[in-house]
């Protein structure tokens, strides 16, 4: 449904929600349509959407990002996604991510694997950071952005000196889906908006990867960050992240 709306017409309006954070009329149209559908099909399940917040129950709820990567979308860059997860308390149990401009669909069910179409996904076998392609989430905007971005800059410096390549894709859903698919070996997202991360986190988990919070505990909707990584890179990525926080505070 979301993909169909995105393909059905060009966006007409782009407005600023907050400082350097955009929304288009397509974001709103997709969220409105999916909320209506989800309420009709599962009225006992709450919905947390990026554009309209949380409505309904909080013990079982949908996490919905109608267009993840709005800036990419608004600029004609085809790296954007519709992301939907069913969350039981704080843990995803079902996920669907579609990349409408790349014609790729991902889905996962807890304990039943993750897939791109009919193809089962597996994270990459990379264990040496020198062979790793790692993505970094967007820079912070708004309050305390300078302080928060000092960590990101330190992380880019440290990983840029050791990893094969660093990428900034501009959509958490794709970052996570591509770790699940083995296109990326890790992603470090120093925020955790559940509509951005809950579907992709389940894809990574079901593909054999790890999704962690800053303190190296398993990721949940209540986490402060989202670090997805292959098992062989866990220690080096987490150590580098810790060192980057120390650099930023020095």
Image: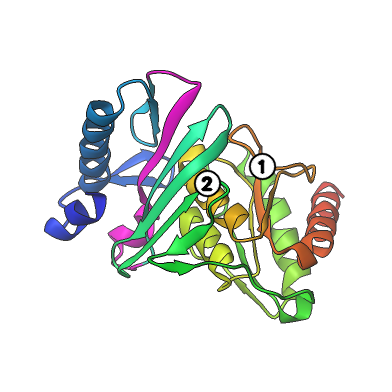
Drawn side of residue 122 relative to residue 215, left or right: left
**Magenta segment, which residues?**
56-78
Q: Position of residue 230 (x, y in %)?
A: 70, 64
Q: Which circle's residue, 1 or 2, is located before the other in the chain?
A: 2
In the image, is residue 151 above or below residue 232?
above
- Residue 162 in view (yes/no): no
Q: How many other residues sit within 10 Å of disc 1, few (<14), some (14-19) or many (≥20)?
A: many
Circle 1 is placed at which residue position?
Answer: 219
Drawn side of residue 65 relative to residue 232, left or right: left
C-beta proximity under 8 Å, tags 1 and 2 = yes
Residue 61: in magenta span: yes
Asked which quadrant contains residue 156, the reply is bottom right
Residue at 75% over, 44% down: 214
Residue 171: in magenta span: no
Q: How many other residues sit within 10 Å of disc 2, few (<14), some (14-19) or many (≥20)?
A: many
- Residue 128 in view (yes/no): yes
Q: Which residue lies furthest to the front in this view?
A: 112
Kindly state the secondary structure of the residue where label 1 is placed. loop
Q: Nearer the viewer, residue 86 or 27?
A: 86
Q: Which of 4 and 139 is in front in this view?
A: 4
Kindly state the secondary structure of the residue where label 2 is placed. helix
Disc sitting over residue 240 in the figure: none
Q: Position of residue 7 (x, y in %)?
A: 17, 60
Q: Position of residue 165 (x, y in %)?
A: 65, 78
Residue at 31% over, 64% down: 75
Residue at 28% over, 33% down: 38
Drawn side of residue 148 relative to residue 52, left or right: right
Asked which quadrant contains residue 184, the reply is bottom right
Circle 2 is placed at which residue position?
Answer: 197
Q: Tell me the distance, in whole angstroms, between the alpha carbons under discs 1 and 2.
A: 10 Å
């Amino acid at each position: 449904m979301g993909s169909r709306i995105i393909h059905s017409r060009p966006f007409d309006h782009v407005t600023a929600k907050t400082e350097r954070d955009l929304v288009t009329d397509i974001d709103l149209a997709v969220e409105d349509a999916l909320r209506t559908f989800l309420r009709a099909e599962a009225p006992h399940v709450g919905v947390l959407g990026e554009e309209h917040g949380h409505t309904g129950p909080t013990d079982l709820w949908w996490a919905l990002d109608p267009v993840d990567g709005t800036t990419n979308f608004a600029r004609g860059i085809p790296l954007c996604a519709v992301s939907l997860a069913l969350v039981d308390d704080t843990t995803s149990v079902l996920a669907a991510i579609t990349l409408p401009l790349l014609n790729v669909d991902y889905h996962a069910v807890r304990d039943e694997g993750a897939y791109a179409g009919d193809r089962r996904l597996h994270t990459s076998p990379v264990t040496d950071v020198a062979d790793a392609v790692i993505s970094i989430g967007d820079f912070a905007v708004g309050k305390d952005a300078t302080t928060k971005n000092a960590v990101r800059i330190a992380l880019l410096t440290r990983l840029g000196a050791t990893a094969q390549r660093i990428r900034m894709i501009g959509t958490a859903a794709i970052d996570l889906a591509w770790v699940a698919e083995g296109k990326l070996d890790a992603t470090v997202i120093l925020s955790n908006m559940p509509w951005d991360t809950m579907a992709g986190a389940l894809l990574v988990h079901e593909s054999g990867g790890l999704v962690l919070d800053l303190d190296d505990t398993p990721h949940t909707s209540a986490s402060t960050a989202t670090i997805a990584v292959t098992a062989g890179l866990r220690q080096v990525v987490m150590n580098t992240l810790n060192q980057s926080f120390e650099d930023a505070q020095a």
